[in-house]
Amino acid sequence: MSELSSEALARRLAELAEEKGATEIVLLDMRGLAAYTDFLTICTARNERQARAIVDEVKTRLKREHDLLPGGADGEGAAGWIVLDYMAAVLHVFTDEERRRYQLEDLWREAPREDFEPSQDGVRGGLYGAAHG
């Protein structure tokens, strides 16, 4: 079990979300802008069911890989927005409609965006590509 920096944790959240098919993944550097976290990882799910699958995968893998559990979680997917709070990094999983409604990237437009390169297969993330490529 290794300890992750806040940036590494935000990137791991993004990677795990992408592996479950999340799209439009953005990492915002909140250091100096918000006291409650260092990074926001924001992504879009096709529907509530996929949003729940993304959240379940993130929770399971971070617990297994780094013995990390979220300090808090909000939303069950039915609202189109689920939040996992890992303190140093917060994951927001939106359906497309709710992401357009809340516009977190616009709300925090002064936050620097960190580069996140999606997997090269362009289909469903790294696991899909490894299994089918």
Image: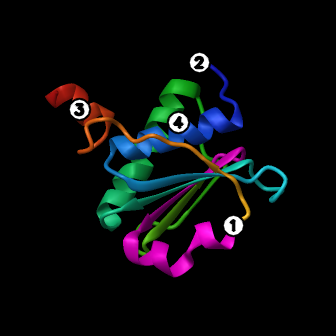
The residue that mark 2 highlights is 1
Q: Nearer the viewer, residue 57 or 122?
A: 122
Give the number of marks: 4
Q: Which mark is residue 12?
A: 4
Find the distance from the CA under tag 1 to the CA under tag 3.
33 Å
Quarter of image, res 4: top right
In which image quadrant can residue 80 be found?
bottom left
* Residue denoted by label 1: 108
Which label is found at residue 129?
A: 3
36 shown above or below 63: below
Q: Nearer the viewer, residue 74 or 114?
A: 114
- Which residue does the image show at 24% across and 26% down from the upper left? 130
Farthest residue in the left direction?
Answer: 132
If the image is split into quadrants, where does the C terminus sit?
Answer: top left
Q: CA distance from mark 4 to mark 3?
A: 18 Å
In the rendered image, residue 102 lying in the magenta stretch gets the answer yes
Which secondary structure lies at badge 2?
loop
- Which is nearer the N-term, disc 3 or disc 2? 2
Q: Which residues are magenta?
A: 85-108
Residue 73 falls left or right of residue 15: right
Q: CA distance from mark 2 to mark 1?
A: 33 Å
What is the CA distance from the residue labelled 3 to the residue labelled 2?
26 Å
Q: Amino acid at mark 4?
A: Arg
Which one is in front in this view, the residue at disc 4 or the one at disc 3?
3
Disc 1 residue crowd, few under 14, some 14–19, many 20+, Cα 10 Å:
some
| Residue 48 position within the rendered picture, expressed as x and y whole percent measured from the top left | 34, 67
Compared with 82, 55 (above or below) is above
- N-term-proximal mark, 4 vs 2: 2
In the picture, measured across the screen, residue 44 lies left or right of residue 104, that is: left
